[in-house]
Each structure stands twice: as C-alpha cells, then as structure tokens.
Amino acid sequence: MSKKNKDNRLLIVIDLDDTLLTDEKKIPEETAKYLKSLQDDGHLVMLASGRPVRALKAFADQIGLNCPLICYNGAYCYHPYDSNFTTFAFRFPKEIIQDIYNQCEPYINNVMCETDTTIWQKDKDEELEKFFWHDGMNITYGDIRETLDSDPWTMVMCDIDDQNNDKIIEAASKYKGYKVRFWYNCAYSEIYYKSTSKLSCLKKIAKYYKIPKKNVIAIGDAENDVGMIKWAGIGVAMINGSVNARRNANIVTKHDNNHDGVMAALKEIIKDFNKNKK
C-alpha cells in the first residue's frame, strides 16, 4: 500500500453478538471473506465485544484479522500479534465484587466472574456459556463470596426480572466509578468501571495507528456500542439493534445480523469512501 493509501485507510471496529454474528453465533462466510479483503486492501478491521479474549481471538483468527481486540467491553485490550502494542487490562478488586454480589443476591439467579485462566460461577448456565466458552478454563462452581480468590476482569449476573434493576444499580454505585450495564434483549447484566469501554480502547487504537476520527467506522447494536457509534466518523447501528443505538448512528443497516447486514453496509460505505478519494 502506498503512503497516500495508508493516509486514507479506514479503521473498522465491529461488535460481535447480534451484529457480526448470526443468531447461531456464526460469522457468515461471505462476510468473513469480505472483511479479510478489506484488510488485504490496507484497512484495519477489528472486533470489540463483551466476550472474553478466547472468543474474540477465535473469531478474529477465523477471518484472518491482524489487529487489536477489545475484550470484556474494554476491560481488556491487546494485540495477539504485535508485541509493540501496549496491552490494557482492568481488574476488579475481589472484595468489592463480593460485596456487590452480597447486596444483589436476592435479585439475581446466577453470577459469573473470570480472568484469562479461571471462571467462578454460582451455577451452570448454558445460555451464558454461549458467550463465555469454558474451553481451556479452570471452572469453580459455588458461592463467589467463598470461592473467588483473585481479582476478576468481569462480573456478569443473570437477573430474575427487570423490576429490581434499581437495586442492582444502587449496589454497584456504592463504589465510585462502578456502574451496571443491562444487556440488550436478554436477562443478563454486568458490572463495569466508567473509564473502561469499547470507546476508550478504540480511541487508544486510533491514536496508535494514527487514524483520524473521520476514518473510523464503528458498527454495533446495543448500549455498550453507543459510545463508539457516536464518536466514530461513521457510526453504524444494526437494524435489529436497540432504539438508542439506532438513534445515535449515522447509518442504520438495511439488513439484520442474519442477512449479512455488516457486509452490505460496509460495501456502501467503502464505495462512497473510494469515490470521495478520487
């Protein structure tokens, strides 16, 4: 790629669930080929998700991507193939997590915490395991007030219903900077720290590669994507996404996650981008 083209390259960041992945949790074959072709053309294509490292790297490797990965909604960001890229990692003090769980216990069915090697989970949960694969992980079931012996990267809860969301929020906000994110269209929520997000990592990555904001495309569907959708030069929301995501986007896809919505939107954006370069 010539210097001129490098100066005009795009940084494309894509959410996984209900965005790039189908409801069967697969990347459509044609979409995967198209994303790899964009990288081959010199653009930077990367994934950002609430999922753990092991899941993001598996999907990135499936496509053949060579770029940083934003994991745990920004709590962990690293580049699997570039030792010069500075890894960012945020860990929750286990004592705070245990106290939050103690307050939330009446309002949740299950809880899960993990690091890159270990999962602590109250009970088995097949639905949660679709997001947090157990492959290669040490798993401890039981009360995390007794079993959690390390500072985790994430805390995910399965809520009984949405009638007690305010109680869960109150439990987390007892600690400065701690917040709760309720997952779109399902019963899960997660604790997060206000300074860690997909957006905070995206800004660092754009700076690392010297990509101007106007050349950043962010694609997502849910509340944890809104920050990067609003900030990016071109923010794209899935047609199947939340109202807030669609409201804050420059573009809403014409097709959903089950019908190559990401690829179709990117083809239109890239077409306009190349036209404007001429």
Image (cartoon, helix red, strand yellow):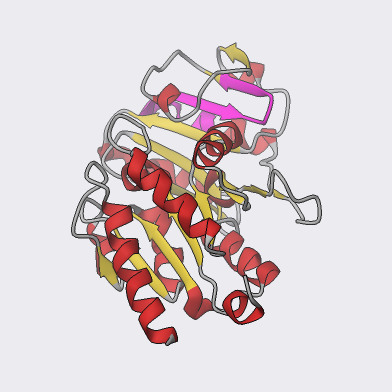
Task: State the extent of the magenta-drawn residues as a range.
Answer: 101-120
Residue at 27% from the left image edge and 58% from the top image edge = 264
Lateral position of residue 239 relative to residue 219, left or right: left
Image quarter hosting the N terminus: bottom right
> Image check: 55 left or right of 161?
right
Q: Nearer the viewer, residue 68 or 154?
A: 68
Name which residue lies at 61% across and 48% down.
75
Q: Residue at x 67, y 69 (%)?
A: 209
Q: Look at the picture and state if 45 lies above or below 97.
A: below
Which residue in the rendered view is the most extreme toward the right? 84
Point out residue 12 in the picture as x, y percentages from the top left corner. Answer: 48, 62
Q: Position of residue 245 (x, y in %)?
A: 30, 61
Viewer-closest of 105 and 209: 209
Asked if residue 110 lies in the magenta stretch, the reply is yes
Image x and y of residue 126, in percent? 38, 17
* 7 and 204: which is toward the camera: 7
Q: Give whichever of 188, 81 is nearer the camera.
A: 81
Residue 91 covered by magenta stretch: no
Residue 171: image location, x then y, percent? 49, 43
